[in-house]
Amino acid sequence: MYEVENLEKIDLTLSPPAEEPARQYYYMAKCRCQVRAFEKENGRLPKACVVNYGCQMNARDSEKLAGILEQVGYRLTEDENADFVIFNTCTVRDNANQRVYGRLGVLNGFKRKNPHMKIALCGCMMQEPSVVEKIRESYRFVDLIFGTHNIFKFAELLNATLESDSMIIDIWKDTDKIVEDLPTERKYPYKSGINIMFGCNNFCSYCIVPYVRGRERSRKPEDILREIRQLTAQGVVEIMLLGQNVNSYGKNLEEPMSFAGLLREVEKIPGLRRIRFMTSHPKDLSEELIQVMKESRKICRHLHLPLQSGSTRILKAMNRRYTKEQYVELALRLRREIPDLAITTDIIVGFPGETMEDVEDTLDVIRTVKFDNAFTFIYSKRTGTPAAAMEQVPQEQVKAGFDRVLAAVQETAREQVSLLQGRVMEALVEEVNDHDSALLTGRLSNNTLVHFPGDASLIGSLVNVVLEECRGFYYFGHLA
Ligand code: SAH
Ligand code: SF4
Ligand code: F3S
């Protein structure tokens, strides 16, 4: 592991090392010189702002970007009017893209007043050539663009940007590389996400992720376990193992290991209290995983199991590789085997060719499985995916279907959450309540939130809470 003070020892008169991560630490040392020069000139440290637009995997990448910026001397801020701003973008649905373009306009205004400001864009959206073309032509004030495959090179690219006045673009088509041991700046002291794999091989016909994140690559179990041990030593009690399809973890390793096998090893780490993971693809959820979850004392009673559609016909067109019946059977088996388990899901409404009859099938699954929570999305056409070439559903029909699906999941979620009324359950105290500073917010193992009176010193600890009053999707309670 590299330590902070090592940056001082790096000899910048030598040429940069070829191997990683040593090369990036060399460039961090160079960036630090630039930061010092800035401090001398301006009498203050430069400020940097990292904005995340995507999923938890992107959020974890953002923590790495922030870690490097902090390491080289930037002061991190949430204010976008900073000296260095980086947007880590998402392109899974079009509204994610539109938000980025909107915010870029605002940044341009800031940059006019602070011409030394540097603006960088990275993440999934940048893996789309049409996006890069648009930025190159219409957003010329952007200083740096890179993608998902070379994010480990951030220190090197940051240095190049600080030394240059022209737009730097570095996008790789794909990679088989995983660079370990770069610094990270975590958002929460008591919980953390951990990437266990990158990319996706599933090619669901609506989804752009496999195109922008590349093929599936698993990190070695020893690297994952070492990272978790380091985190627990720093006080982390809850981790979330991240991957687009964690159930296929380990298949491409030199010594293959199943996801359930990895969980067994993670369970043994002392000091670690809670294990979460996401996302599980229903087609790959093994019997072994159900058994490991059942026996575990640390794996949380929550499974996110995206349904996408309840219609077998639509599921086939989506290339999901399970039927309505297979999904329902799996979900009900999970409910039987692990009675306290909360099952949440993702649903898309308006996939090409979807009829009201298909929506009925989705409603039927919602009512049968009784999801504890669900994210419902309106289908968004993604250029280059097979579904983009299929016949699209008229807007009004999509809207009608969406409203019905949303109402149904809200109903089952309310019903499921209310089942806990009066029980005493363990909660991880996460923060002081946003609206009332006398209250703390804690998260139950099954992912339900509970608000209760308490002192901020409890943040990061596990406490028992009486679930007094159900307020729809969350509880009010008090310490037991
Ligand atoms: N790997 C995860 C999902 C990643 S994307 C999985 O397979 O479950 C998160 C969610 O975004 C998906 O579950 C899906 O519901 C939704 N989504 C993906 N592409 C979409 C699109 N083109 N339009 C609308 N929703 C989409
Ligand atoms: Fe997209 Fe499907 Fe891969 Fe999930 S499993 S990231 S929905 S292609
Ligand atoms: Fe978005 Fe990329 Fe995640 S497209 S959902 S940020 S993998």
Image (cartoon, grey):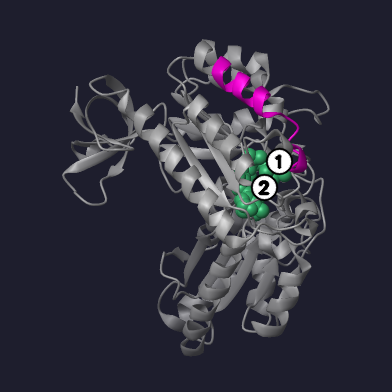
Which dot marks residue 354? 2
Q: Position of residue 89 (x, y in %)?
A: 60, 61
Q: Is residue 176 above or below residue 171?
A: above
Instruction: Name the residue located 51 percent from the left edge and 25 percent from the top edge.
Output: 368
Would residue 74 appear left or right of 442 to someone viewing this image? right
Does the image show residue 272? no
Taking the magenta stretch, the answer to whether it contains residue 65 is no
As drawn, the residue found furthest toward the front would be: 357
Which dot marks residue 314? 1
Would residue 183 appear left or right of 462 to someone viewing this image? right
Q: Is residue 291 above or below residue 377?
A: above
Instruction: Name the residue located 22 percent from the left edge and 21 percent from the top edge.
Output: 422
Taking the magenta stretch, the answer to whether it contains residue 322 is yes
Q: Secondary structure at mark 1?
A: helix
Indicate the quadrant where residue 327 lies: top right
Residue type beneath disc 1: Ile
Residue closer to the observer: 224 or 147: 147
Q: Is residue 179 above or below residue 478?
A: below
Label 1 near label 2: C-beta < 8 Å?
yes
On-image quarter of the N terminus: top right
Residue closer to the observer: 418 or 272: 418
Does the image show residue 137? yes
The main secondary structure of the magenta stretch is helix
Q: Secondary structure at mark 2?
A: loop
Q: Position of residue 4 (x, y in %)?
A: 54, 51
Instruction: Name the residue located 54 percent from the left edge and 31 percent from the top edge.
Output: 364
Q: Give the residues drawn in magenta, as a range.
A: 316-333
Q: Position of residue 286 (x, y in %)?
A: 68, 19
Tell me the crowding category of disc 1: few under 14, some 14 to 19, or many 20 or more residues within 10 angstroms, Cα based.
many
Tell me the crowding category of disc 2: few under 14, some 14 to 19, or many 20 or more residues within 10 angstroms, Cα based.
many
Q: Position of residue 190 (x, y in %)?
A: 40, 37
Q: Which quadrant of the figure shows ligand 2?
A: top right
